[in-house]
Image (cartoon, helix red, strand yellow):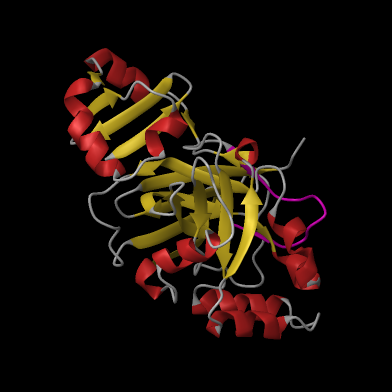
Amino acid sequence: MKLFKTAGGIVLEHEQQYYIPGTDWDTLINREKLYTYLKSSLEAFEKLSPGAVVAFQNSPLLPPIDSQEVWAAGVTYLRSRDARMEESKESGGATFYDKVYVAERPELFFKSLPHRVAGSGQKVYIRKDSKWDVPEPELALYINSKGNIQAYTVGNDMSSRSIEGENPLYLPQAKTYERSAAIGPCLYIPELPISPDANIHMKIIRGNATVFEGTIQISQMKRTLPELAGFLFREMDFPTGVFLMTGTCLVPDNDFTLQVNDTVSITIDHIGTLTNVVGYRL
């Protein structure tokens, strides 16, 4: 099942049929056994007419978030560890990334409040005071208020590698700014946990040329998804749940940096494609 959020309301897709769940976003998603609830409620939901389906398919999407915070995990893939060590070697911070990759405790950091999050089709930003900027394609979890993973979406953890590489203490500035996070296009709500064989694919287009393209399976992640969720909930409460990006492995070469008007498309099997154009905050 997939839940979409639009300016016109919430739409549930199941087996090529479309429904209106008829409640607010936070109440709808923040429950135990979300898949079971939605499946058992289909007959009670209003079904979209053919005309309404066409209107929905042509309407802009909003990020599938309401009051939830967005958090992120770092250095969960070997390639990410190597990239972080490379960018921070001159500052002397490389050893931190090596140690956290093998440590029991993962790196977790606050990423965004909901009003700063972009949806598919909306712009993401790069910082004007940064010289080296990259997208970070990630599987993102929706975890309910009880700490249980209920759904998945595509995440883009935009990052200033030059600022983080200058000093690890600059991580909040490298990671948290207007439109530094994007999630979408929907919430994917399966009956069983997402397959570890699911692929994450990213393509970056500049003009008419593809300047980066890569694919990785989420099975390459060193940590498990429940492990990351468990650490996030150790000493914090999230009354309406929370989104957690789970780390990246698709890291462009060190001579690559994003430019304004680049298009970043991230696809995860079963979920869909999150597409954003790069810009500056006005």
Position of residue 239 in the picture relative to residue 24 (left or right)? right
Where 249 falls versus 271 (above or below)? below
Q: Main secondary structure of the magenta part?
A: loop
What residue is at 51 percent from the left and 57 percent from the top?
245
The quarter of the rendered structure image containing the N terminus is top left
Position of 82 relative to 229 (above/below): below
Total numbered labels placed on residues in the image: 0
Given residues 129 and 26, the one toward you in this image is 26
Give the residue drawn at x 35%, y 35%.
Answer: 3
Residue 4 position within the rendered picture, expressed as x and y whole percent measured from the top left: 39, 33
Say which quarter of the image contains residue 166. bottom right
- The stretch of residues the image draws in magenta is 123-136
Where is residue 22 drawn, in percent x and y?
34, 20
The quarter in which the C terminus is drawn is top right
Camera sees residue 52: yes
The quarter of the picture where residue 214 lies is bottom left
Q: From the viewer's perspective, is residue 169 above or below residue 189? A: below
In magenta stretch: residue 126: yes
Pick whichever, 133 or 147, lies toward us: 147
Q: Does residue 16 show up?
A: no
In the rendered view, tell whether residue 162 sits above or below residue 204: below
Give the left or right position of residue 151, taking residue 67 as reference: left
Q: Position of residue 11 (x, y in %)?
A: 34, 27
Residue 96 lies in the magenta stretch: no
Quadrant of res 74: bottom right
Residue 234 location, x and y as percent? 54, 63
Q: Pick the residue in front: 160 or 190.
A: 190
Q: Residue at x 24, y 55 (%)?
A: 192
> In this rendering, would 137 be left or right of 158?
left
